[in-house]
Amino acid sequence: MTRSVCRTRRLRRSLRASGAGAAVLLALSACSSSTGSEEGSDSSGSAEVSGQVTVFAAASLEESFTTLGETFEKQHPGTEVTFNFGGSDALAAGITSGAPADVFASASPKTMATVTDAGATAGEPSTFVRNRLEIATLPGNPEGISALKDLTASGLKVVLCDEAVPCGAAARKALDAGGVELTPASYEQDVKAALTKVELKEADAAVVYRTDVKAAGDKVTGVDFPEAAEAVNDYPIAVLEDAPNAGAAKAFVELVRSGEGQRVLTDAGFSTP
């Protein structure tokens, strides 16, 4: 069955903070006309929930949230979940600039605080999962990378997330914990962009989340490193104060936090709070 244009294209790219609000508003303008009932918050399907719910979510949540979006639509016939996946900092900037959204799921408390400090959440956010870093290498790890310090080898092309986004901030914390000085070949706008560089063999390695390594399958090889324990990210989620469809937003958050939602997320490699 063909979804609406907005649903099908599922925005993945992160938007830089400068001008992010306007860009997100333009990206979602085609989706903003559909609103639904604001009644009901039960993710079991027994409450009356309908219409479109727009979820802004960290890029690392793309696979698991896409699955949960499909589950939500089955539980609540007549609903449509539209996602905007990207760097948490840009998504937060878009929300505080007025982009229409119902739910925000961030990859760090710091980026969620941008939204809560602006009074843009309905109640306190709650942490629903945690994530930690891995090194993604080319398939089979041909360079023999086994530790964070190996990323400094001469001629090795390594990419990191921009330090403004949670995966980049976590990578910086891990590098500092290991006393590793690394100048990357590039800083990427979100974790998916960093991982894609390795998948396309445009980089030898990237420091990304273990969930993204798992989602990539045999396109990359993952390498654990002990310093990742010093840079675990909590993921908070919240219904937004000006949510066009508050009832559906609450129901979606409940699904994410439910046993069913947590199973999907832990299967993707996240850990419980």
Image: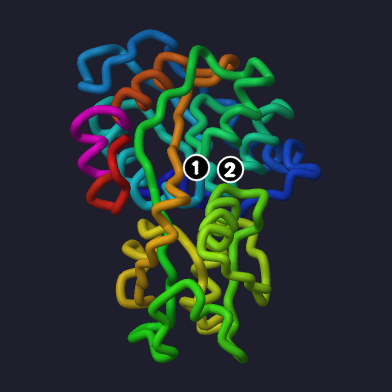
Q: Quadrant of residue 74?
A: top left
Q: Quadrant of the C terminus?
A: top left
Bin the neighbour count of mark 2 within 10 Å (Cα to Cα): few under 14, some 14-19, many 20 and up.
Answer: many
Q: Quadrant of residue 89?
A: top right
Residue position marked by numbered label 1 in the rendering: 107
Bin the neighbour count of mark 1 within 10 Å (Cα to Cα): few under 14, some 14-19, many 20 and up.
Answer: many
- Residue 253 sits inside the magenta stretch: no
User: Label 2 amino acid?
Assistant: Ser
Q: Nearer the viewer, residue 196 or 142?
A: 142
Q: Which residues are magenta?
A: 256-265
Disc 1 is placed on an element classified as loop
Q: Is residue 143 above or below residue 235?
A: below
- Residue 264 sits inside the magenta stretch: yes
Q: Quadrant of residue 45?
A: top left
Outermost residue on the top side: it is 39
Instruction: Determine the main secondary structure of the stretch shown in magenta.
Output: helix
Which percent across, then down, holds residue 269? 29, 53
Answer with left or right where residue 22 lies relative to residue 49. right
Q: Nearer the viewer, residue 268 or 29?
A: 268
Tell me how the rendering is colored: rainbow
Answer with left or right where residue 224 lies relative to residue 181. left
Q: How many numbered callouts? A: 2
**Disc 1, disc 2: CB below 8 Å?**
yes
Numbered mark located on residue 88 in the image: 2
Which percent across, then down, holds residue 270? 32, 48
Label 1, label 2: how far apart the Cα atoms are:
6 Å
Disc 2 is placed on an element classified as helix
Comes first in the chain, label 1 or label 2 = 2
Q: Nearer the viewer, residue 99 or 155?
A: 155
Please name the residue shown 53% across and 33% down the image. Answer: 109
Answer with left or right where residue 40 lies relative to residue 133. left
